[in-house]
Image (cartoon, grey):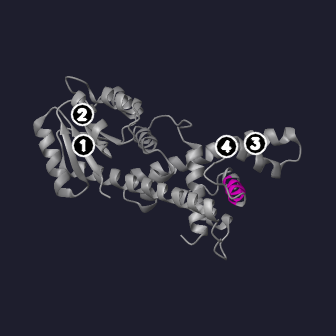
Amino acid sequence: MTLSILIVDDDIVSRSMLQDIIEECGAGELVGTAEGGIEGEQMIINLRPDVVLIDLLMPDQDGIETVARLKALGFAGKFIMISQVDNKEMVGAAYQQGIEFFIHKPINRVEVEHVLKRVNEQWKYERYVLEIQQSLTKFNIVETPPIAKGRTVRDISRVILIDLGILGESGSKDVIALMEYVIEQKQSVEWPSLKEMYEAVAQTYKPTAKEVEKESKAMEQRIRRTVNAALTNMASIGLTDYSNHKFEHYAPLYFDFQDVRMKMRAMEEDQPGDKGKVNIKKFLHVFYMETVEKLNGG
């Protein structure tokens, strides 16, 4: 399938330039253009494009408001914001609404092609995750496929942890234990809650109920620190080499890309370190799907 793209910009010159770039670089198929936020909102609802390039400042309805309204309506496509404004507060507000990238005006062909390429890769990875999930659903309904001989959950988990740069983190052993637990249980689409997984694994560490509860909470903190470390590592790689194969594979697969981008921005601006925002359940679920795929010869 081809990435479908829609442009929302009140400037006819910008729309024309973006259309030419999209058609010439082959990053996707242009399905429509709109001259303002209100018109764009209706077109997006009707056409459901995969990606929307949207201007920040428009006279009828600005880009941030349009994105927020569409998100509230359940639109799940990706947004790329276009703007000549370099206001940190406005940029931060746009990222909080869930945009993927900024393209700066005046429009630069190389920048647009670069951004579209990254968004296209992210879209493909998400489809890849969905296909794995659908395959696992089929396997769990019919029959769990046999595990390839010679490779264990621990072996495969360690390789992924090494690639993410977190094998030495204290929570890495917990991640491996969780993978061994959920795969041994042959979990179906009904993915267990984090609390259930933590408590189940904690029972193998500690004998009494009180100690299990304490260990479960400690495990939660160790895993959160470990996943945050993975996010930091991916952001660091992305800043150094955006085309690095580990960054291209793991960053959009294991994390929400706006979180990776905001982490990169924070590192670029040398902002004080914080715990960061990570989706632990998504990280562990993707880790599980990749582990199962590799166990079965993928």
Circles 4 and 1 in contact, beta carbons < 8 Å: no
- Front position among marks 3 and 2: 2
User: What's the mark number on residue 40?
Assistant: 2
Callout 1 crowding tier (Cα within 10 Å): few <14, some 14–19, many ≥20: many
Is residue 180 shown in magenta? Answer: yes
Q: Does label 3 or label 4 sit earlier along the sequence?
A: 4
- The residue tagged 4 is 194
Residue closest to the far top = 60
Separation of marks 4 and 1 at Cα, in angstroms: 38 Å
Query: Residue 16's image quarter?
Result: top left
Q: Does label 1 or label 2 sit earlier along the sequence?
A: 1
Q: Does label 4 or label 2 sit earlier along the sequence?
A: 2
Looking at the image, is 55 positioned above or below residue 226?
above
Separation of marks 3 and 4 at Cα, in angstroms: 10 Å
> What residue type is disc 2 on?
Gly
- The residue tagged 3 is 216
- Residue occupying the point 36% across, 38% down: 99
Q: Is residue 297 left or right of residue 29?
A: right
